[in-house]
Image: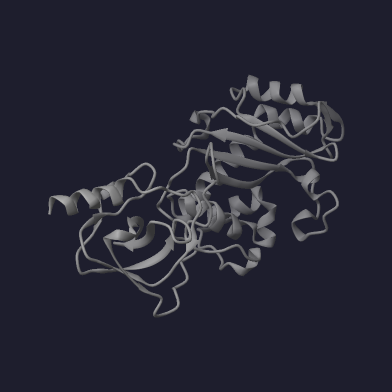
């Protein structure tokens, strides 16, 4: 028994963890009691959930093809459990589609990236419904759980990449929907659905609070002093140093990256510590470790 307990400890606590996920289905029939983790890497287990001997749990995904962990539905929450804790009964029936508003509760990431497109720059040369009437302003691309090293988490609900509108509609309340449509023109082409499945499902939140936060942080950035200065310069050119200085004066020195294409701005990304406060003005910056993607001087398309 002591040897078995030792092996269980090694399998559960020391198994390697991959940042990506691979879809899986079927059921896991537990043959011993094991903890059900919210995060593999951090070994967090809010509520001290566990799989119980003899019980079957729906398999939603695995941490990688042939990996050591299953993402299971445990008491209505998505939790990681070591494969050694039971027998995989396979996919006797097609896996049920994950509800579009249910998050992946395995919040395993280092920081958030608030990605805001410069609308006229992103839409330059694009003929899309969300680009009609585009002007020089920041609009929401996405709020992304991100990692300092390795792949960023994605599709934590077990879904896969597909056409944006191939995902089902999101169930959001009317106020959030209005707010989201105002800051994310891409919702006209179902960008919100894609962003939820690829990124939002990895936040550990359900869709409603995730998008409430995304809207609030977008509005915060759109009304900031750097955004006001950028709009004032719309139609002209600016220096990269000047724009970064505007963000530094705002309190985000070294926590912003600028992304350009063919000499004009396409996107601004602001990096935030993972514990996002309800009040965006209380958010803490996260140091950006990469390279700026704009030249020393670039255009802000009107």
Q: Nearer the viewer, residue 38 or 196?
A: 38
Residue 255 versus residue 132 in the image, above or below = above
Can you say whether 130 is above or below 117 in the image? below
Task: Residue 23: give x, y in percent of width and height.
Answer: 48, 64
Left or right: residue 115 compared with residue 241 = left
Looking at the rendering, in which quadrant would you find the C terminus?
A: top right
> Front-most of 114 and 93?
93
- Which is nearer the eye, 287 or 272? 287
* Residue at x-position 81% and y-position 26%: 296
Up/down of 197 relative to 59, above or below: above
In the picture, which quadrant includes the N terminus?
bottom left
Tell me where residue 72 appears, x and y as whole percent.
36, 62
| Left or right position of 133 against 252 | right
Residue 34 lies, in percent from the top left, at 24, 55
Q: Residue at x 65, y 37 (%)?
A: 269
Seen at 87% across and 31% down, the residue is 236
């Amino acid at each position: 028994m002591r040897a078995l307990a030792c092996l269980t400890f090694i399998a559960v606590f020391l198994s390697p963890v991959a940042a990506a996920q691979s879809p899986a289905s079927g059921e896991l029939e537990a043959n011993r009691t094991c903890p059900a983790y919210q995060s593999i890497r951090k070994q967090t287990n809010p509520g001290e959930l566990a799989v119980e001997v003899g019980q079957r749990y729906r398999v939603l995904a695995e941490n990688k093809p042939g990996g050591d962990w299953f993402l299971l539905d445990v008491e209505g929450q998505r939790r990681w459990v070591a494969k050694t804790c039971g027998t995989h009964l396979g996919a006797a029936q097609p896996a049920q589609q994950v509800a579009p508003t249910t998050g992946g509760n395995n919040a395993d990431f280092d920081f958030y990236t608030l990605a805001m497109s410069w609308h006229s720059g992103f839409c330059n040369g694009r003929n899309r419904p969300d680009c009609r009437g585009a002007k020089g302003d920041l609009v929401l691309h996405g709020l992304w759980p991100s990692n300092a090293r390795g792949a960023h988490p994605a599709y934590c609900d077990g879904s896969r990449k597909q056409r944006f509108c191939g995902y089902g509609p999101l169930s959001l309340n009317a106020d959030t929907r209005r707010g989201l449509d105002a800051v994310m023109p891409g919702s006209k082409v179902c960008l919100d659905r894609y962003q939820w499945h690829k990124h939002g499902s990895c936040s550990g939140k359900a869709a409603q609070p995730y998008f409430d936060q995304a809207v609030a942080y977008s509005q915060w950035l759109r009304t900031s002093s750097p955004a006001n200065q950028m709009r004032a310069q719309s139609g002209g050119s600016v220096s990269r140093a000047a724009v970064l200085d505007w963000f530094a004066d705002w309190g985000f020195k070294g926590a912003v990256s600028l992304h350009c294409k063919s000499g004009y701005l396409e996107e601004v990304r602001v990096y935030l510590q993972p514990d996002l406060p309800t009040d965006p003005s209380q958010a803490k910056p996260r140091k950006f470790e990469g390279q700026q993607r704009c030249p020393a001087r670039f255009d802000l398309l009107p």
